[in-house]
Amino acid sequence: MIKQNYTHDQLIELVRNRNQQAFSYLYDNYSQALFGVIHSILNDFEESEDVLQKTFLKIWNSFSSYDEKKGRLYTWMLNIARNLAIDTTRSRHEKMKTKIQSRDENVDRYEGKMFIEETSHETIGLKKIVQTLKEEHKVIIDLAYFEGYTQEEISKKLNLPLGSVKTKVRQAILRLRELTKDEYLN
Amino acid sequence: MTKDEIISSGIMETYVLGIASHDEVALINRLCLEFPEINNELELIEKSLIHYASQTSKPLNPVLKNEIVSQLEFSAKENNATKVISIAKSERRLKLYKYGMAACLFLLITSLAYNLLLNEKLKNLVVELQKSEDEQNYAVKEININKLALASIRQQLQIVAKPKVITVVLNGMNSLAKNSAKIHWNTVTDELYFNASQLPKSPDSKQYQLWAIVAGRPVDAGIINWSDSGGIFQKMNLIKGAQAFAVTIEKVGGSVTPTLETMCLLGNV
């Protein structure tokens, strides 16, 4: 298959026209990343596949609600994936609650996730970026990227002044970019 | 804030992550249009984030893509080949339109001409129809006249055919030497009719008057109303025991006694 490269605007135009090649491009370029986001939240491969499927159906079927003025296409898709995944954890929580009427109901989303991650075997064999990223950078990226925390939430969570959240986010992503560059060079 | 300050502020990173404020989003959108570097920077940030998230899980099952595609609706496939064909098609269509227009014009003109012709024919037909209507009206009048005539003849016939009616022929003399007339007289009811198929017009300011001779004396039987057709069948005065009838020419309105010199018809019973 010939790999085509579209500009951001071209891709949006093609998707608006329900072009099948554009869908193929969207899927090939973004599905693994969106899946990574979903999987980071759900930590269940099969469940994450279901949510990814829902995510792409929603992207395609409600594309008319995408507004370039509110952000980039990937950011919009990321929001859809994140929200669907978080909805799934909520319904999962509901099920849990009805099953066992006990346990701390205010389990922090992030701490809960960390707990599952540590016990999961699915993180074994991942590439080095994830492993080489410093913990302080990883935490802030995961909060902003995977968990969808607002700047205020991050500041509270990490005990940072609100004004320095952006700087911290930038530092973490700069590091990520360096690592990415290294990987491409290797 | 300068462009570089914005780049180093972290606003662009939060923009891509979807956690920038409304004002920050608007700011970045505006700068993107102005500076290609900003756009470029955004793409690099996005790329690194995509790359990072892609590595946090095992690769997806390739089957999933087709599963999703089968649930979506796409527009009809477009490619260059079909576009070329469609241009050729549209040219052919344009030609067809030209021929179509020419054909339409021709049909329009023909139709107009035919309309004019038909209109002319229609006018003639209306005139002819009027004529034949007039003729019909005339014929109806004729028939009515004939009906009336027939009715009157039947009536006359009934009068004449009664058994007690006698007919007296009045022979012409003097000015009416070549003419004749008849009297039909019912001797039971005394009814009297004057009957002439041809009687010349009386001279100006004169009228024909019928007399019955009863016991040798003339009795006025009435004035005869002359008609244009010349045929007369007229009921006269009642007469009893007449021996003869005569017609004289008298002044308008008739006379009390007949003028013997003007006697023109005479017959004995």
Image: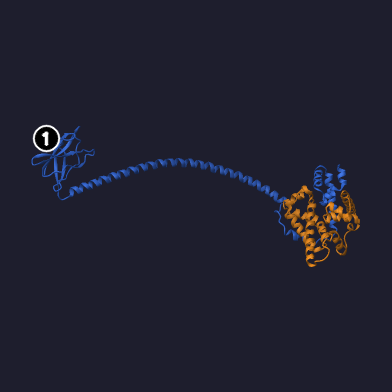
Q: Nearer the viewer, residue B24 or B139?
A: B24
> What is the quadrant of residue B219 in the picture?
top left
Q: Position of residue B225 (x, y in %)?
A: 20, 38
Residue B30 seen in the figure: yes
Residue B62 seen in the figure: no
> What is the quadrant of residue B209 in the picture?
top left
Question: On the rendered image, what quadrant is the C terminus of chain B found in?
Answer: top left
Q: Position of residue B115 (x, y in %)?
A: 49, 42
Looking at the image, the residue that sits furthest to the top is: B204
Which chain is rendered blue in the image? B
Residue at image mark 1: B260
User: Residue at the location (50% across, 41% down)?
Assistant: B113
Left of B89 or right of it: where is A21?
right
Q: Nearer the viewer, residue A43 or B32?
A: A43
Total numbered labels placed on residues in the image: 1
Q: Position of residue B239 (x, y in %)?
A: 14, 43
Identify which amino acid the numbered label 1 is placed on: Leu
Question: On the rendered image, what quadrant is the N terminus of chain B found in?
Answer: top right
> What is the quadrant of residue B123 in the picture?
top left
What colour denotes chain A?
orange
User: Residue at the location (54% across, 43% down)?
Assistant: B107
Left of A29 or right of it: where is A168?
right
